[in-house]
Image (tube, rainbow, N blue to C red):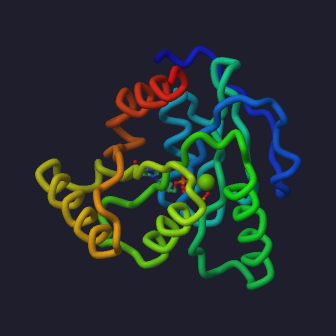
């Protein structure tokens, strides 16, 4: 699929104020700094569509981007960022939870995982949470440019093992990506295109 247009629509801290249009939407979620906003920029060919930063905690709201006028990409704040205050954390949690539990348009969640790290408890918990509320999801490994090509398969296999140990029967659909080299871009866009046409 070719991205012809990608436009920022709205930022919200209230899930009920998100766009009302019934268009399919794909949300990016994961730990702070894992590369959610960078990946949105990479797949849409825009350097600055979503705001990125080397410092964790950059994205603080639910951001809707309309793609090709007929579907949405959604950039969300990261979880697991220790430096935000307890009350900020609670507010984040509330609107993120509301988004995942109430957003009818949510077609698929992409959970981003830094390919360099061993499976983190907070991610496994979030994956289990999405399972509990029955939100379809895929896993996206990020920052693959930071490890040697030969290590990619081993990292994915290790993650699969962690999921199986965590009561999942199989590794969900997954993608290996790099926002630096555009690795995984075509596969991810093909997946979205296929789901949009289901
Ligand atoms: P929050 O909004 O804070 O939750 O972070 P985020 O998940 O949106 O991460 P963001 O896209 O802002 O990227 C965080 C940092 O990682 C930035 O310095 C990016 O340049 C860097 N980064 C993101 N993706 C990649 C990647 O694929 N490869 C490399 N080498 N760096 C990346
Ligand atoms: Mg971000």
How many numbered discs? Answer: 0
Q: Nearer the viewer, residue 39 or 122?
A: 122
Residue projecting furthest to the left:
150
The residue at 48%/50% (across/down) is 137
Does 137 sit left or right of 17 as displayed? left
Does 44 sit left or right of 115 as displayed? right
Say which quarter of the image contains residue 162. Answer: bottom left
| Image spot of residue 5 (x, y percent) | 64, 18
Asked if residue 170 is positioned above or below residue 105 in the image, the reply reads below
Asked if residue 57 is positioned above or below residue 104 in the image, the reply reads below
| Image spot of residue 20 (x, y percent) | 84, 35
Does 192 sit left or right of 102 as displayed? left
| Image spot of residue 47 (x, y percent) | 57, 34
Say which quarter of the image contains residue 102. Answer: bottom right
Does 104 sit left or right of 173 as displayed? right
Residue projecting furthest to the bottom:
86
| Image spot of residue 111 (x, y percent) | 48, 55
Asked if residue 5 is positioned above or below residue 150 in the image, the reply reads above
Ligand 2 lies in quarter: bottom right
């Amino acid at each position: 699929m070719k991205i012809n247009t990608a436009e920022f629509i709205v930022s919200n801290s209230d899930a009920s104020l998100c766009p009302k249009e019934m268009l399919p939407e794909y949300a990016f979620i994961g730990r702070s700094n894992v590369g959610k906003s960078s990946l949105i920029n990479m797949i849409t060919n825009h350097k600055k569509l979503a705001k990125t930063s080397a410092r964790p905690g950059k994205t603080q709201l639910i951001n809707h981007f309309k793609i090709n006028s007929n579907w949405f990409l959604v950039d969300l704040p990261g979880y697991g960022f220790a430096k935000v205050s307890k009350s900020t954390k609670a507010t984040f949690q509330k609107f993120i939870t509301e988004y995942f539990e109430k957003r009818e348009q949510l077609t698929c969640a992409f959970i981003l995982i830094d390919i360099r790290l061993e499976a983190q408890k907070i991610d496994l918990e979030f994956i289990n949470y999405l399972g509990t509320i029955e939100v379809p999801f895929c896993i996206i490994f990020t920052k693959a440019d930071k490890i040697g090509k030969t290590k990619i398969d081993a990292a994915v296999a290790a993650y699969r093992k962690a999921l199986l140990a965590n009561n999942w029967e199989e590794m969900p659909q997954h993608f290996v990506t790099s926002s630096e080299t555009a690795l995984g871009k075509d596969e991810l866009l093909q997946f979205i295109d296929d789901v949009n046409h289901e």
